[in-house]
Amino acid sequence: MSTRKRSATMPRMNARLVEKEALQLPVEKRASLAQRLLESLDHLSEAEAEKLWLKEAARRAREIDEGNVRLVSLEELEQRMRARRK
């Protein structure tokens, strides 16, 4: 296994190709990869985290504007949460 770091001139892998290849892995390997990817998100810089949250906020606002989600009141949310705890 090579420990060489990718140089700036080395071509970047296409994310869709990486995803396609990863989905072909056995379940144990996919689970391990998923865990490592999720753990890597714990080490984002503040700027990276802010960028991701802004992108997520924009996505959610777009869903609301397009009528793809139904907003609920705080009271309804609390009622749903109590029902789930039963």
Image (cartoon, rainbow, N blue to C red):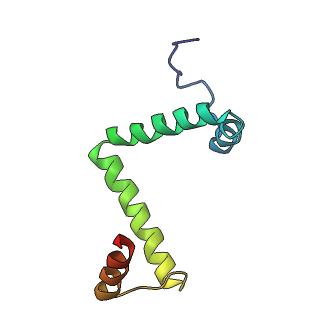
Q: Residue furthest front?
A: 86
Q: Nearer the viewer, residue 51 or 72?
A: 72
How many numbered marks have been drawn onto this rendered protein structure?
0
Above or below, 70 against 46 in this view is below
Q: Is residue 85 left or right of residue 61?
A: left
Residue drawn at point x = 37 percent, y = 80 percent: 80
Q: Position of residue 26 (x, y in %)?
A: 68, 33
Q: Judge whether residue 52 can be spotted in this image.
A: yes
Q: Is residue 84 left or right of residue 18?
A: left
Residue drawn at point x = 30 percent, y = 48 percent: 47
Q: Nearer the viewer, residue 15 or 69?
A: 69
Q: Quadrant of the N terminus?
A: top right
Q: Quadrant of the C terminus?
A: bottom left
Q: Position of residue 52 (x, y in %)?
A: 40, 55
Residue drawn at point x = 44 percent, y = 42 percent: 38
Q: Position of residue 17 (x, y in %)?
A: 69, 40
Above or below, 16 against 81 in this view is above
Q: Nearer the viewer, residue 30 or 9?
A: 30
Q: Position of residue 23 (x, y in %)?
A: 68, 41
Q: Judge whether residue 12 can be spotted in this image.
A: no
Residue drawn at point x = 55 percent, y = 81 percent: 68
